[in-house]
Image (cartoon, rainbow, N blue to C red):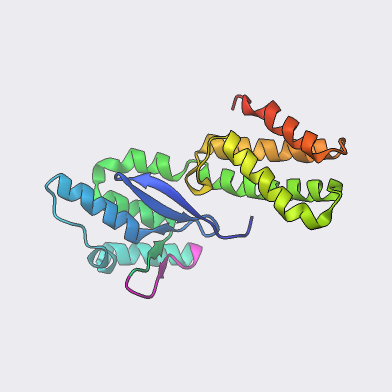
């Protein structure tokens, strides 16, 4: 899925944004959350600018850019974010708290972004299948919005940006199930109902 979506990930007791398309993280939010943690643990605050200007960080970002291209995107304006490559994000997180090494690696390389993108792609395929069967094309936008809301409600999701891996994967399974049912059923309502019902208790 090509559309850029901002996902929310929890670390240091705060929500850190990640771009689904570039996979870059908000270093600004990371440092804000990390500094709250550091102050609570009687540590000095972490300065992102000083870190990025250090010899070690400069050498690291140069190597990242040689291999992956841009590693830092600095926003403009007072409340803008500085976005960083996932590997640079790890380095910053570990500089804030070196004890986090295992947690950060596990947290970074989970499948949240993969499932978000997969379920976004399957949503398009499901929508196309429903559109083919939908009798009144004028009412399709409202209908597909109701279908999306129904799936969201049944999975107990308030906001897809903060959904769990399991919820996103189940959404992907439901989308694909509805798409397949639309190929054999003329009644889209029945296809949606069966597609959701059959997969709510699906064991991942």
Quadrant (top left/top right/bottom left/bottom right) for the C terminus: top right
Work out which residue is located at the far bottom of the displayed protein and give it: 76
Residue found 39% across the figure and 67% down from its top: 62
Does residue 122 lie above or below 87 as drawn? above
Q: Position of residue 70 (x, y in %)?
A: 46, 68
How many marks do you count on the picture?
A: 0
Q: Position of residue 175 (x, y in %)?
A: 70, 40
Does residue 25 lie above or below 104 as drawn? below
**Image quarter of residue 106:** top left
Magenta stretch contains residue 70:
yes
Dominant secondary structure (helix, strand or loop) of the stretch shown in magenta: loop
Q: Position of residue 108 (x, y in %)?
A: 43, 45
| Span highlighted in magenta in the image | 68-78
Residue found 15% across the figure and 44% down from its top: 41
Q: In the shown orientation, is residue 96 left or right of residue 128? A: left
Work out which residue is located at the far left of the displayed protein and give it: 42
Quadrant (top left/top right/bottom left/bottom right) for the N terminus: bottom right
Pick the residue in front: 33 or 107. 33
Residue found 37% across the figure and 69% down from its top: 80
Residue found 71% across the figure and 49% down from its top: 144
Pick the residue in front: 141 or 12. 141
């Amino acid at each position: 899925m090509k559309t850029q979506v901002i996902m929310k990930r929890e670390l240091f007791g705060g929500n850190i944004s990640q771009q689904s398309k570039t996979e870059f993280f908000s270093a600004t939010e990371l440092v804000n959350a990390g500094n709250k943690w550091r102050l609570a643990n009687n540590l000095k605050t972490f300065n992102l600018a000083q870190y990025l200007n250090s010899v070690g960080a400069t050498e690291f970002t140069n190597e990242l850019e040689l291999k992956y291209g841009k590693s830092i995107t600095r926003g403009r304006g007072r409340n803008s974010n500085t976005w960083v490559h996932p590997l640079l994000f790890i380095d910053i997180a570990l500089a804030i708290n070196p004890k986090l090494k295992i947690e950060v690696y596990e947290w970074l390389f989970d499948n949240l972004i993969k499932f978000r993108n997969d379920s976004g792609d399957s949503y398009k395929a499901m929508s196309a299948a429903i559109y083919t069967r939908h009798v009144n094309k004028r009412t399709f936008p409202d209908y597909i919005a109701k279908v999306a809301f129904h799936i969201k409600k049944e999975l107990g999701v308030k906001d897809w940006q903060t959904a769990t891996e399991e919820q996103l994967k189940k959404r992907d399974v439901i989308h694909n199930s509805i798409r397949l049912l639309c190929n054999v059923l003329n009644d889209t309502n029945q296809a949606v109902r069966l597609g959701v019902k059959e997969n709510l208790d699906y064991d991942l």
